[in-house]
Structures are given as structure tokens and as C-alpha cells.
Image (cartoon, helix red, strand yellow):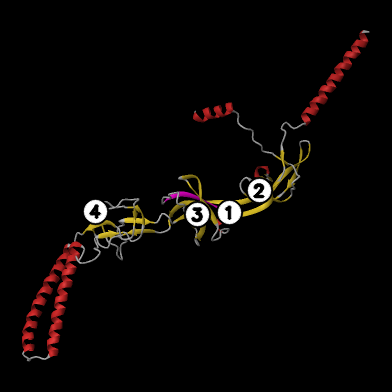
Amino acid sequence: MKKILKYVGIGVLVLGALWAAAFFVKSNSKSAVEYETQKPFISSIEKKTVATGKVVPEDEVNIKPQISGIIDKIYLEEGMQVKAGDLIAVIKVVPNEQSLNQARGRVRNAEIALNNTRIEFNRNKALFDKGVISSQDFNNLKLQYDQAEQELQNAKADYQIIRVGSAGGSATANTNIRATVSGTILEIPVKEGDQVIQSNNFNDGTTIAAIADLGKMIFEGKVDEGEVGKLELGMPLEISLGAIEKKTFEAKLKFIAPKGIEESGAVQFKIEGDVTVEDDFLIRAGYSANASLVLESKDSALVIPEALLQFDKKTDEPFVELSVGDQKFERKDVETGISDGVNVEILTGLTENDEVKVWNKTEPIKKGEEEDNKEESDS
């Protein structure tokens, strides 16, 4: 009886060991991580690029003086609406001493010449009345007298302009700085008492004010050389402004620079687009902006999330892993099309019924882990 019990006990131990071994093998034959799968789906997809830049007025006019001097009075302020002809500022002329002295001397010479011509004219007029001299000789003397009078008037006018900036009879004095266009005053970079110089062949002159129509704005930005070849004039742009949240503005591409500029090792091309300004929004000159351009688009394309793609380490070719059984997968090479950064078009290699392995799924961070990470970053 004891022997029987002994053999039964040994048998139980052997069976238990075999069962444990089988369970261990079966448990270890399963993957430690259970992978989920996703199926390809049909969707529209667009490849976009974003150009960074700013929004500026289409036409900005700089108002410059016609004469040098000192700002005597400024009548308007930045941000005010003006019409063409409105008075912005007045300049007080500080004449050049040498020019003033020359003008004064010219007036004196003209007076001397006029007095001499007047005496000669009066003497010959008496002779002409008596019939001593001919009509032709008298007319020549009359012409000289009239010319001497006109020369004196011109000399006095030039002297007045040099001394005070205006001849007095002018409808618009050179010392009055007026708006040449209608719009908004963007900037008045001078103040009362500042010295200004006139615009000439050797100098642009001092800017008294900058005026622009804020109802006509354009976007100025830059795009990379790898994308500029896909742009076409007239393409729609979607403009978003950092200063105006949750609002986009429509625009049309109107200019692509024929020459690029190298910046930080990359060649950038300037682009411009006409922005449609809505009456409900005030867009200020110089707002930073981003323009979204659709480079390529397709409707009803077979796509998968871009995160499902894997790339061969040697050839760098894309592939996915397809489910062929319970947690069993096999590699499948695919050909991709355009991508919008989230989904990618699949040209060949997959169908809508395939189940693609989600190989890089990330687990959500738990609340306790977030607090620990925050404490580590703070420390």
C-alpha cells in the first residue's frame, strides 16, 4: 500500500511538473506587448506649407520737405486719418548766410539797373514825344525798362524765398508740409525743434510723416527653395495673424521673387499676396503673420496615419506590418504619396481591408507621473 501511494505521489509530481512546463512554454510563446491594428481609409488629403512674414500696407508714402529748416509746429498725430492736402507740419526756415547775402546783393543790383534804365527811358520819352527819335528806338528803350522792372521783382522774390521759405504770394508755401495722399498716419519720426533737410539728388531728405491706406494690405513672407517651384500666381492663401486669434483672412498670391536670398544656409524666396481686409477688423501695419499654401491635394485617396509607417534601416524605404494571425505580423513594402503631416497617401501595397500594426503606440502619462516629471523639471 505504501508503495502504491509512493508511486501515485511520484506520478502526481511528474504530471504537475509537466503541466507547469507546458504553461511556462505557452506563456512565453505569447508577445509581452499586444499590438493594436488599424485599417486604411479613404479621405481627402492636402500637402501644405506655411510661410512666415508680416502684413504691411500695399502703398506707403513718405512725406518729405521741399526746403531745409526746423520743425516749427506739428498739427497731427500718429494714427489719425488724413486727406490729401491736409496740413501736417510747418517748417521755420533757417537761411544760409552766404545765399542770403548773395540774394540781397542781387536785389540791390536790380534796383541800380532799374533806376538807370528809368532815367534813360524818361529822357528818351520826351524826345519821342517831340518826334526827335523814331518809334523803333523808343520801343527798344521801353523793352529794356520793362525787363529791368521784372528783374527787380524776381530778385526780391528769390530773396524772400531764401529768407522765409515763401515768396508770399504763393498759394502753397514750401514751409507747409501737407499730405500728398489720403490714409492713416503710420509714423511721425520727427518732433518740434528737429532740423530737417530737403530731398535732393544727393540725399533722400528727412521723412516728416509716413501715410498709408490700411484698407489695402499685402502679406510679405518667404518660402524655401524646395517649395517655391510648386507655387503659382493667383494661388489662394490663408493668412493668420498673431494679434487676432481664431480668425483667418483670405489672400491671393501676386508675386514670387525671381531671385532667392540665402539665410542660415537655406535659400529663401520672397512672396507677396493681396489680403482681403474685412471692415470689422483693424489690421495694423507690421502685424506678424503666417500664410498657409496648399501645394498638392487629392480627393478620395487611400491613407493611413503617418505614424504607422516604418523605414528600412538600409534602404530607407517605407513599409508597414500587416496582421496575418493572432499577434502575428509580416512586413509589407508600400509606396507613399503626399502627406499632410498626420496622414499619408498610400499609392500601392495596401487595401482597405488590410490591418496595419500600430507599432509605436504611446501610453498616456498618468497624473502621478506628470507631477513627478514637473517636479524634476522644476528642480
Mark number for residue 294?
1
Horizontal and vertical percent position of residue 247: 50, 46
Q: Which sits earlier in the primary sequence, circle 2 or circle 4?
A: 4
Q: Amino acid at mark 1?
A: Val
Q: Are marks 2 and 4 in contact (CB under 8 Å)?
A: no
Give the Cα distance between marks 2 and 4.
64 Å
* Residue picked out by circle 4: 73
Q: Which sits earlier in the primary sequence, circle 3 or circle 1?
A: 3
- Mark 1 crowd level (few <14, some 14–19, many ≥20, 10 Å Cα): some
Depth check, front residue: 75 or 35: 75
Horizontal and vertical percent position of residue 375: 52, 27
Q: Is residue 336 visible?
A: no
Horizontal and vertical percent position of residue 78: 33, 50
Give the Cα distance between marks 3 and 2.
26 Å
Query: Helix, strand or loop at disc 3?
Result: strand
Considering the whole magenta stretch, tell me its main secondary structure: strand
Q: Amino acid at mark 3?
A: Lys
Depth check, front residue: 320 or 249: 249
